[in-house]
Amino acid sequence: MTTESTASPSVPVLEARSVTKRFAGVTALDSIDFQIRAGESIALMGENGAGKSTLIKVLTGVYQPDEGELLQGGEQTAFARPLDAQKSGVSTIYQEVNLVPLMSVAQNIYLGREPRTRLGLIDFRRMYADARGLLDEYGIQVDVRRPLRSLALGVQQMVALARAVSIHASVVIMDEPTSSLEAREVETLFRVIGLLRERGIAIIYVSHRMDEIYRVCDRVTVLRDGRVVHVGGLHDLPRVELISLMLGRSVEKVERGGLTAFRAANESVAPPVLQASDLSRKHQIDGITLSIRPGEVVGLGGLLGSGRSETLKGLSGVMQLDRGSVTIDGKTVRSGSVPAAIRAGIVMLPEDRKSEGIVPNLSVRDNIVLAALPKLSRAGFTSKRKQDAVVDVFIKRLHIKVSSPDQIVSELSGGNQQKVMIARWLAMTPKVLLLDEPTRGIDVGAKAEVQSLIDELAHEGLAIVLVSSEVEEVVEGSGRVIVLRDGSIETELTGEHVDERSLLAALAGDSADDAADESAAAASGTPLTTKDNA
């Protein structure tokens, strides 16, 4: 059974003061102030790299702050490890269920604190009864004797929630808790959250889904680049303004340049080179349909978790689809097969070049020709002369700064590593190039060079799909933008509607006109009830 928090309503039940955390010279958290009171539900928002995960790990004892302090009930505290945080009443439910699948439901709930008989043995009868009582209390109907692995993923998530609150929690941190839940299970979760708050338990809620945030939370703390950029109530904050705070972009319309070539490409009457229909995978993407013509740059807009990267993985064969089809020049590409996609002419630059892209211990030459080796081989033997010819062409064309092709690729700057990855796929003479965050982690100069290269490749007739978390990059680099939300297509922006205001409005689920109205109301201080909060 859970207990009500004894903290005074005016005293935060958990607080971080001026918390700073650094990793290898990179400041992940910069003087963060965060507090939550008993019975309160706070949304923790921010895009990838904003610092959300690092803050959660500091609050739960995974990381120790380099500067600053934690307080519970107004008293200074410190968690040397996650178990210390749990014993102090801070529980976490992660996106991935972190339980023991072979054990029963009851054993998972009471793992490490099983009730004992007088002889010191586990009292299974009492444990089963307590587990049933706990789950019944929250309306979760399940046989507590069953192995956890035999239950649906959504039910497993609810068991994780039951375990979290059974440890006499005063604070429960929920990290993307609905990512694996069906609609009915989501409703159960929201009802449980309401019960927890009535008992004085504080909820820190991390989610990319705006509908959930506005339904579950009272206040929001927005992080960007490791800093707190906004703290305040949610229900007076229009969604489009929240998106703007997360991304660091104004909702006002901005002038764009450099799109003449892309607009001309968009007006081409050439038939689509790629057509995708009804791409779907449970809990990730649902019914994605799109087409792209030669020389066109199509941006995929969306917040973290919207299905951008998953769409690229479905197109490139990295992810097996539940249904849907991909065709290149009218020929169907086998789903879930990267080799089949490459043979058809689809290649992808992955988001994480270090773990999914470059081979760090190999040379620049080896990294560039890696995918093209079968084309450069005869009877199982590769020609160094042919390899050098290919490598020289792309080093010069992409302006890759190397001492020699034999230089180890991990010694290059991030921007040059990215160019090596692009060179690898261009060596395959593809028809469609999928770019997932192509300028992430590289300096301003290298970013401009990569963006210029994308423009040049489109001029040459390559079809490009661009994913970027930077609104400006998507707007200025794309002829049209397909906006994704919760794994589905929300809308498509074309022509003069490819601007920042329209994209921000689409990310928030509003029309451009609604965005303008909300912005004006916010600027004038006039309360505005949006369709989301009505």
Image: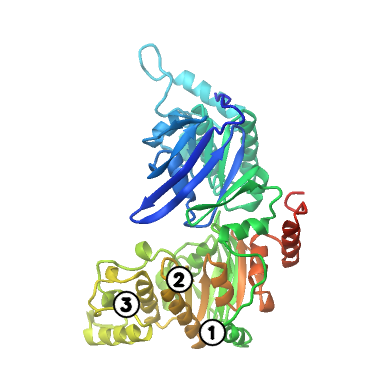
**Disc 1 target residue:** 295
Counting from the top left corner in percent of width and height, residue 426 is at 40, 81
Counting from the top left corner in percent of width and height, residue 353 is at 38, 66
Residue at x 64%, y 64% (from the top left corner): 504
Of tags 3 and 2, the one toward the viewer is 2
Of 298 and 402, which appears nearest the observer?
A: 402
Inspect this view and state whether residue 71 appears: yes
Which residue type carries mark 3?
A: Ile
Of 514 and 428, which appears nearest the observer?
A: 514
Of 149 and 191, which appears nearest the observer?
A: 191
7 over 357 or under it: above or below: above
518 over 179 or under it: above or below: below
Label 2: element kind: loop
Which residue type carries mark 1?
A: Gly
- Separation of disc 1 and disc 2 at Cα? 18 Å
Q: Badge 2: how crowded within 10 Å, few (<14), some, or many (20+)?
A: many
Residue at x 49%, y 47% (from the top left corner): 32
Label 1: element kind: loop
Of 277 and 389, which appears nearest the observer?
A: 389
Counting from the top left corner in percent of width and height, residue 153 is at 52, 44
Mark linked to residue 368? 3
In the picture as drawn, the residue positioned furthest to the top comes out as: 118
